[in-house]
Amino acid sequence: MHYLKFLKALHDRFDPEVYFEIGVRRGASMTLARRTAIGVDPSYLIENPLCEDAHLFQEKSDDFFATKKLSDVLGSRKIDLAFIDGWHNFEFALRDFINTESYCNRRSIVVFDDVRPRSESEAVRQPHGGAWTGDVWRIVDCLTKYRPDLKLTLAATNPTGLLIVEELDPASKGLSSRYKEIEVEYLDPTLPLMPGPELLSRFITPEAALLSIGQAR
């Protein structure tokens, strides 16, 4: 199953009032939103029709979260479904999650793209003109270790897998309070470029993942 088909299934099932996306690019995934869509990307080029209540911010996610722009759009609402597909370095993905979770509630769902690199050339930390996942996959081990309260589901979608995060806690400081420590740990240059067999064994079929979402652990 392609990741866009998986995301469409989430929209069909949960009909999120507020959809939030980091890494809009051409809008292929953002066009799935039907109610309110909020997208952040420093260099998007929309080629797909978006819903009527769409809000685009052409800036880096760190800069976006440093302002109150998201609060201005949300008002009293929370993010129902978020898709994190920004810059493909671990520390960016971690900051994007920390910031996004603070605008969620217990029923929200956060999805990470590119957590199952297919080769070392895809998993390097610098883009090189070809397919690139970077080291986003390390977020799986990080959340498993530092946020055991979260429910994590790994879906073997094409082309490079998804991580679905549930049971969020917007008040948690488990990551933000230890950010520097975590960054040093996961940016250690001696770490392997690719996920090992233990992590890869946690991926399940997209169909099984969809059945799992919304179910208690």
Image: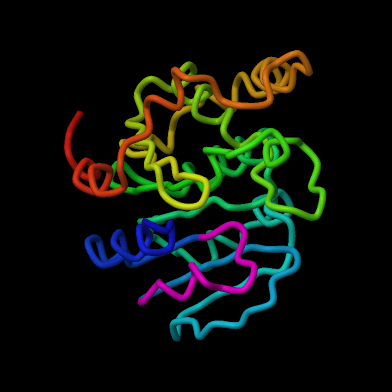
Question: Looking at the rendering, which quadrant does residue 69 occupy?
Answer: bottom right
119 relative position to 190: left or right:
left
Residue 119 or residue 106, whichever sits in front? 119
Reply yes or no: does residue 30 show up in magenta: yes
Residue 60, position as x, y percentages in the image:
73, 56
Looking at the rendered image, the quarter that the C terminus falls into is: top left
30 relative position to 26: left or right:
left
| Residue at left offset 33%, top offset 67% | 17
| Residue at left offset 46%, top offset 52% | 158
Residue 170 or residue 208, whichever sits in front? 208
Residue 30, position as x, y percentages in the image:
49, 70
Tag count in the figure? 0
Question: Looking at the rendering, which quadrant does residue 126 occupy?
Answer: top right
Reply yes or no: does residue 69 show up in magenta: no
State whether residue 81 is above or below residue 169.
Answer: below
| Residue stretch in magenta | 21-34
| Residue at left offset 53%, top offset 23% | 142
Give the main secondary structure of the magenta stretch: loop
58 relative position to 211: left or right:
right
| Residue at left offset 61%, top offset 37% | 136
Looking at the rendered image, the quarter that the N terminus falls into is: bottom left
State whether residue 215 is above or below residue 197.
Answer: below
Q: Which color mode does the image show?
A: rainbow
Residue 179, position as x, y percentages in the image:
65, 24
